Image (spheres, helix red, strand yellow):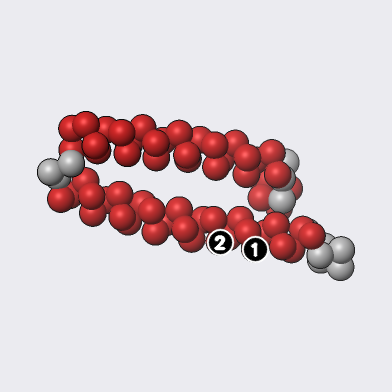
């Protein structure tokens, strides 16, 4: 499987976003329980959140390309 097939696969994105959601949920609970006073942790969460927004935009763009019947993806 090449990268084009991988990134065009709905199954890959479902696993990716499910795994990402689980990691972020655990991190969020850990922040509430133990790390709420940690400015570094909150800063890192913000940066990771921004990275996830970019990844979501990338995935949404791929989904739009896949929906276009004239696009070779």
The image's mark for residue 43 is none
* Mark identifier at residue 61: 1
Q: Nearer the viewer, residue 35 or 73?
A: 35
The quadrant where residue 43 appears: bottom left
Question: Is the residue 32 above or below the residue 43 in the image?
Answer: above
Who's the residue at 62% across and 44% down the image?
13
Q: Dot 1 surroundings within 10 Å: few (below 14), some, or many (20 or more)? A: few
How crowded pointer 2 is (Cα within 10 Å; few <14, some 14-19, many 20+) is rated as few
Q: Residue at 39%, 40% (x, y): give it.
A: 24
Q: How far apart are marks 1 and 2 (CA)?
A: 6 Å
Quadrant of the drawing holding the N terminus: top right
Tell which residue pokes out farthest to the bottom in this image: 70
Q: Position of residue 2 (x, y in %)?
A: 70, 46
The outermost residue toward the left is 37
Tag 2 secondary structure: helix
Residue 2 appearing in the image: no
Q: In the shown orientation, is residue 3 left or right of residue 52?
A: right
Q: Is mark 1 on a helix, strand or loop?
A: helix
Asked whether disc 1 touches disc 2, contact meaning CB atoms under 8 Å apart, the reply is yes
Q: Where is residue 28 in the image (x, y as percent from the top left)?
A: 32, 39
Please tell me which residue is depicted at 39% across the width and 59% down the height of the picture: 50
Q: Quick check: 52 above or below 28?
A: below
Q: Which sits in the foreground, 61 or 8?
A: 61
Name the residue tied to disc 2. Answer: 57
């Amino acid at each position: 499987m090449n990268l084009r097939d991988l990134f065009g696969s709905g199954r890959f994105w479902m696993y990716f976003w499910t795994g990402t959601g689980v990691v972020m949920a655990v991190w969020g609970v850990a922040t509430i329980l133990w790390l709420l006073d940690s400015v570094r942790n909150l800063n890192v969460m913000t940066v990771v959140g921004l990275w996830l927004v970019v990844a979501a935009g990338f995935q949404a763009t791929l989904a739009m390309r896949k929906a276009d019947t004239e696009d070779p993806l």
